[in-house]
Image (cartoon, rainbow, N blue to C red):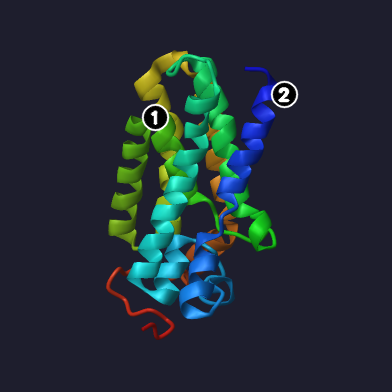
Amino acid sequence: MEISQLTPLLLAAYLLGSIPSAVWIGRAFFNIDVREHGSGNAGATNTLRVLGKPAGISVLIVDLLKGLAAVSLLHFFSTLAPETQVFRKHQLFLGLAAVIGHVYPIFAGFKGGKGIATLLGMVIGISWPVAILCALVFICTVWLSKYVSLGSMMGAAFSPIFVRFIYGADETFFLYFCLAIAGMVVYTHRANIQRLRAGTESKFSFNKKPEINTP
């Protein structure tokens, strides 16, 4: 597949990623913009914190599906054989477009979330073993520390190690891509890092009452 053929799919992946599930669910069912409450982030964690479990879980599922759907486009519009390095490379580009769409959504004034759930959905569609291992690192880190931001950064940081462990030296591009993504995740969490250092970062609790009274 040539770049000219991939371009429409990149645009479609970006538009998929731009679906602002947290913003739309908050406005449609609670008449609020989650970006004006809590951490100001349009993601599943802040939605859970502000609006409660049903809204937070709904946003998480939609954001996961955005990344998964973006990389799955290639299965319908490419003649490349799946599981080849070229196929996976194109999937990575599509997944990145979806993550960028989540962070800078055209449908929500280019102010979105941090892309972690969309990123995980992308990795599920490309390599479910890597996704499972990253998710386990995330869950263990959050369980021990109670910090979702730290779990996100740790999961991303371990992704290149898991790629190398599973694929060896055969997936150099995937490895470097995960290194770049890990850097991006740390960058998007720079405010969280400052709060972690200051001891003011909010701790996660699934049973905590939402900040806003919900029906």
In this view, which residue lies farthest toward the front? Answer: 76
Residue shown at 52% from the left, 80% from the top: 31
Q: Earlier in the sequence, mark 2 or mark 1?
A: 2
Q: Secondary structure at mark 2?
A: helix
Please state the horizontal and vertical placement of residue 66, each as a whole percent of the image. Answer: 49, 46
Please state the horizontal and vertical placement of residue 56, each as a whole percent of the image. Answer: 39, 65
Mark in the foreground, 2 or 1: 2
Residue for badge 1? 127
Quarter holding the N terminus?
Answer: top right
Where, by quadrant of the figure, is residue 106 drawn? bottom right
Q: Is residue 35 above or below residue 20?
A: below
Residue for badge 2? 4
Amino acid on which disc 2 is placed: Ser
- 212 relative to 1 in the view: left or right: left
- 181 relative to 47 in the view: left or right: right
Please state the horizontal and vertical placement of residue 28, each as a whole percent of the image. Answer: 50, 73
Please state the horizontal and vertical placement of residue 147, each as a whole percent of the image. Answer: 39, 61
Residue shown at 45% from the left, 13% from the top: 170
Residue 204 visible at all: no
